[in-house]
Image (cartoon, grey):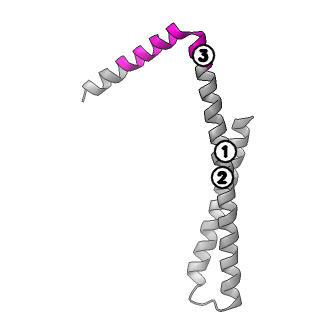
Amino acid sequence: MASITAKAAQEVLAADFQALVEDAEKLLEHSATLAGDQADVLRAQVRESLARAKASLHETEQAVLERGREAVDVTEAWVQNKPMQAVGIAAGLGFLIGLLATRR
């Protein structure tokens, strides 16, 4: 369930940032020609897009943190249930990393 939430939040975040970029580009292109109310409307659109992007970023952050906590909990449970296998895997990974490091 957390992966679905994270994926949806990621898509919303990407869409919000795309809208923010588009609004910022409009603001830059038209800043010289816009006056008064038009400039105010465009600035309000940029502020609104930025607020949506910030909210989406916060939601994505929470989803990623939740998935991270779940991964830590699952890993801790596995290591507690199978300590010798965990030590063997850690030793094997250490050996492989050592081999790769010495090849340079």
Mark pair 3, 1: CA separation: 24 Å
Mark pair 3, 2: CA separation: 30 Å
Mark 3 neighbour density, 10 Å: few (under 14) some (14–19) many (20 or more): few
Q: Residue at x 53, y 10 (%)?
A: 83
Circle 2 is placed at which residue position? 58
Circle 1 is placed at which residue position? 62
Circle 3 is placed at which residue position? 78
Q: Earlier in the sequence, mark 3 or mark 1?
A: 1
Mark pair 1, 2: CA separation: 6 Å
Q: Is residue 101 magenta?
A: no
Which amino acid, by three-letter code, is at mark 1? Answer: Gln
Which amino acid, by three-letter code, is at mark 3? Answer: Trp
Q: Earlier in the sequence, mark 3 or mark 2?
A: 2
Instruction: Please tell me whether residue 6 is drawn above or below residue 24 in the rendered image.
Output: above
Between 51 and 10, the one nearer to me in the picture: 51
Residue 44 location, quadrant: bottom right
Q: Residue at x 71, y 81 (%)?
A: 41
Q: Are marks 1 and 2 in contact (CB under 8 Å)?
A: yes
Image: magenta residue range: 77-95
Q: Residue at x 63, y 33 (%)?
A: 69
Q: Secondary structure at mark 2?
A: helix
Q: Quadrant of the C terminus?
A: top left
Q: Position of residue 98 (x, y in %)?
A: 31, 22
Count how many numbered circles sit on residues in the image. Answer: 3
Between 65 and 12, the one nearer to me in the picture: 65
Instruction: Please tell me whether residue 13 is drawn above or below residue 35 in the rendered image.
Output: above
Q: Secondary structure at mark 3?
A: helix
